[in-house]
Amino acid sequence: MINEPVYNELIEKYKAHYGKAPEVVSYAPGRIEVLGNHTDYNEGYVFSAAINYGTFFAISRNDAGVNRIVAGDLMHEVTFPLTGATPVKEDTWANYVIGTVAGLNQIKQQNTGFDAMFLGNVPMGFGLSSSAALEMCTAKAVCQLYTITADNVTLAKVGQAAERDYAGCPCGLLDQISSLCGVEGMLVKTDFRSLDVETVDMGPSVCFLMCNPHAKHALVDGQYATRRQACEDAAAYFAKVLPHPVAALRDVTMAEWEANKDGLDPIVANRAAHPIGEDERVLLGAQLLEKGDLEGFGKLLFDSHESSRTMFENSCEELDNVVAVAKTVPGVLGARLSGGGFGGSAVVLVKTEAAESAAKAIAEQYKAKTNKDCEVSMIQPSIGASIVYTA
């Protein structure tokens, strides 16, 4: 079992706290974004992966008429009603669970209360989406306990709504879909127009490093808003000048961008070039992986970061330094910022046999270059959300 020590710790704590064993235990992983940056709201494509760190959720029915949830690391309990639950202002970690349960109740109302506890090991501060892991393991466990039937897209939307309406964190569907649809050794390729998902084999010869240089997110909300508006403005312009329908930048090729960019404000044109190029990189990346060309795929990660740095301008000095250092390290095939940017972490594609030495080299060389620490963790594409135990 993946993360067996975490599972065993959860079971012991659950029994000690509730005085009984759980009826159901679920698991859901965090995720990394590998390729396809800021393409989701442009109806484009993204490569992501479920990771080998995640969260377990143990649950059983009770006759108390309320739901009880305990964070296994804090051993603190929050109680909320079966229906009409609202976000809590203290112990706000519970809102991810409360919101997910509220969404599932719209599909099928639970008929008893439950006793639940969760525990995970997703590294904090790396941008690996521990919140989506919690939402999706909650969803899997509650569905199993109350025989609720829902497909992955429905569960992802339930998690998205929980994050938006209960936790106050607007997000797309990438995190939840990646957590649900992961397969060991595979990347998850998502089409954000159709929400079709497929998995693409990477093979055992490569893995990822997540590098956290502790870069502070600066003016994130405003930066996101201006980038998104630029993309929408560019799409509206291309819809007028191109001889085919353009609903989003996904419908524009780089050749069309090149031929028509002069009609746009230069900054808007540059912003548009990034998701347009990212879509093409994801599609090309799928072809390269099918051929087993991992070096070619890795180069696309470097190209992606350069586009983030120069065209979309959503990188930062710390992430640029991580990528620059990684480019010189033996065994590294590619590197780029991961997620929204403006801070956060970088993802590095590395040969598995060189992962340990590469992680050490990146940390040491980053320290020598900046006199600051960079935390590095090894990441493997892993299984998605699942039920791991039923009584």
Image (cartoon, grey):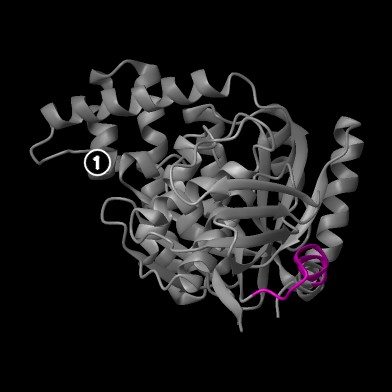
Q: Is residue 100 left or right of residue 193?
A: right
Residue 361 horizontal/vertical position (percent): 87, 53
Residue 322 lies in the magenta stretch: no
Q: Mark 1: which amino acid?
A: Val
* Secondary element at tag 1: loop
Q: What main secondary structure does the magenta stretch of the protein show?
A: helix
- The residue at the far front in this view is 64
Can residue 18 be spotted in the picture?
yes
Can residue 283 be spotted in the picture?
no
Counting labels gives 1
Residue 15 horizontal/vertical position (percent): 78, 71
- The residue at the far top in this view is 265
Classify 133 as above or below 16.
above
| Residue at (35% x, 22% y) in the render | 229
Kindly indicate the quadrant of the structure image that contains residue 234.
top left
Residue that badge 1 annotates? 252
Please name whichever residue, 290 or 35, is drawn nearer the observer in this view of the structure.
35
Please name whichever residue, 219 or 245, is drawn nearer the observer in this view of the structure.
219
Placement of the C terminus among the 4 image quadrants = bottom right
Q: Is residue 163 left or right of residue 247?
A: right
Please name whichever residue, 60 or 372, is drawn nearer the observer in this view of the structure.
60
Give the magenta range: 12-22
Residue 324 horizontal/vertical position (percent): 72, 41
Mark 1, other Cα within 10 Å: few <14 / some 14–19 / many ≥20: many
Classify 135 as above or below 51.
above
Please name whichever residue, 139 or 187, is drawn nearer the observer in this view of the structure.
139
| Residue at (56% x, 24% y) in the render | 220
| Residue at (35% x, 61% y) in the render | 108
Placement of the N terminus among the 4 image quadrants = bottom right
Q: Is residue 196 left or right of residue 172?
A: left
Residue 19 lies in the magenta stretch: yes
